[in-house]
Image (spheres, helix red, strand yellow):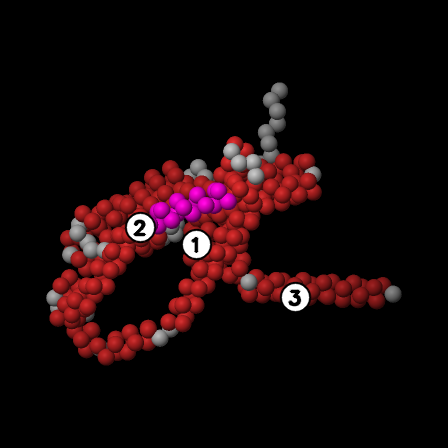
Amino acid sequence: MNDADDDRRIARRALIVIGLLLATVLALGLVYATRRVLIWGLVAAFFAVALKPLVDRLQRRLVHRRALATLLVFVVAFVVLAALAALIVVPLVDDVTRFAQRAPEMLREARAGQGPVGRLLDRVGARNFLAGHSDEIARYAERLRQPAVGVLRSVAEGVIGLITVIVLSYLMVLEAPRITGSVMAAAGEARAARWQRIGREVSRTVNGYLTGNLLISLICGLLTFLVLLLTGVPFAAVIALLVAIADLIPLVGATLGTIIAALAAFVHSPTAGIVVLVFFVIYQQVENHLLWPVILSRAVRLNPLTVLVSLLLAAELAGLVGALLAIPAAGIVQVLLREYAPFRRPPPPPAG
């Protein structure tokens, strides 16, 4: 009888383990299949956390209707973004137009060993290689024109993703008081106080990271534009925009920006390339040891090793979006560990 009970107990445990494994596999498969929607939701949640304090403040002081306050904040936010985009797009379009007009001439000069590109190819010994493999390069360029449908599909998916993120973040901010109230009422007084404290810390972390990262990228882009303009490098606005976008990626973004700007400057002239390279070496030191600690250390208190590991894991899981959201996500995990980790220090005993 005891042996039969033991056998049933072992069989029951084996079935439970098998069921948990199958449920885990199904859950991971579901996450992988819906990873794009989950990433959109995660990005929308970060934007919602960033904009919610503004909506709350506007609702308390001026507009008492939540829907109107949310709509006004979103409209103002996108008007500001559109104005900044216009300041960038106007010189960007001008540079792209000039580049398109000069492209055939630059190509002819490069083939003849003239102009900045041709002289650079001569210095590195690449012009002979290009002349001897012109047919292969032409065929490769022709193949690059073929996946136009894939490009259009990617653009359409990007537009759909942007609209989805905007709608989701708007609804999250609009319904935040109702959702928060229901959760707090179900949690009880003690848990509600702790969750409110966690919510404030998470909001501070996300807002500090987004504001600080955008400010650092803006500084990097403006300084890059000034240096390229002073050294006479063409298409300075385009290059500075690419550098600013690359600088949004923590730690490695400045290095990517250095490669982009230095290559463009060396194509223009060796002197300009050296000046730009020296500028970025100095700027990276300033950004890593002054701008990041001063601007972000108060919002996201993470050591460099944690930042690097978070970036690598997030980039592997979610690509560029994961790399951009890695640091605030790690900051949120740190907030949760401070609250719930069993090894955190107990409060000091009262004096006396």
Asked if marks 1 and 3 touch (Cβ < 8 Å), the reply is no
Nearer to us: label 1 or label 2: 2
**Does 304 sit left or right of 183 as displayed?**
left
**Residue in the picture at 40% in, 46% down:** 79
Residue 209 within the magenta-colored segment of the rendering: no
Q: Which residue is mark 2?
A: 88
Badge 1 amino acid: Ala
Nearer to us: label 2 or label 3: 2
Which residue sits furthest right? 1
Instruction: Name the N-terminal-most of marks 1 and 2.
Output: 2
Relative image position of residue 160 (x, y in whole percent): 47, 60
Q: Which residue is mark 3?
A: 22
Q: Is residue 22 above or below residue 164?
A: below
Query: Circle 2 — which element?
Result: helix
Query: Circle 1 — which element?
Result: helix
Magenta residues: mostly which secondary structure?
helix
Relative image position of residue 211 (x, y in whole percent): 42, 42
How many neighbours does mark 1 have within 10 angstroms: few (below 14), some (14-19), or many (20 or more)? many
Q: Quadrant of residue 174?
A: top right
How many neighbours does mark 2 have within 10 angstroms: few (below 14), some (14-19), or many (20 or more)? some
Residue 83 within the magenta-colored segment of the rendering: yes
Instruction: Name the N-terminal-most of marks 1 and 3.
Output: 3
Query: Circle 3 — which element?
Result: helix
Whole-angstrom CA distance, mark 1 to mark 2, is 24 Å
Q: Which residue is mark 1?
A: 323
Badge 2 amino acid: Ile
Badge 3 amino acid: Leu
Q: Nearer the viewer, residue 84 or 253?
A: 84
Task: Write down the region rendered in magenta.
Answer: 71-86
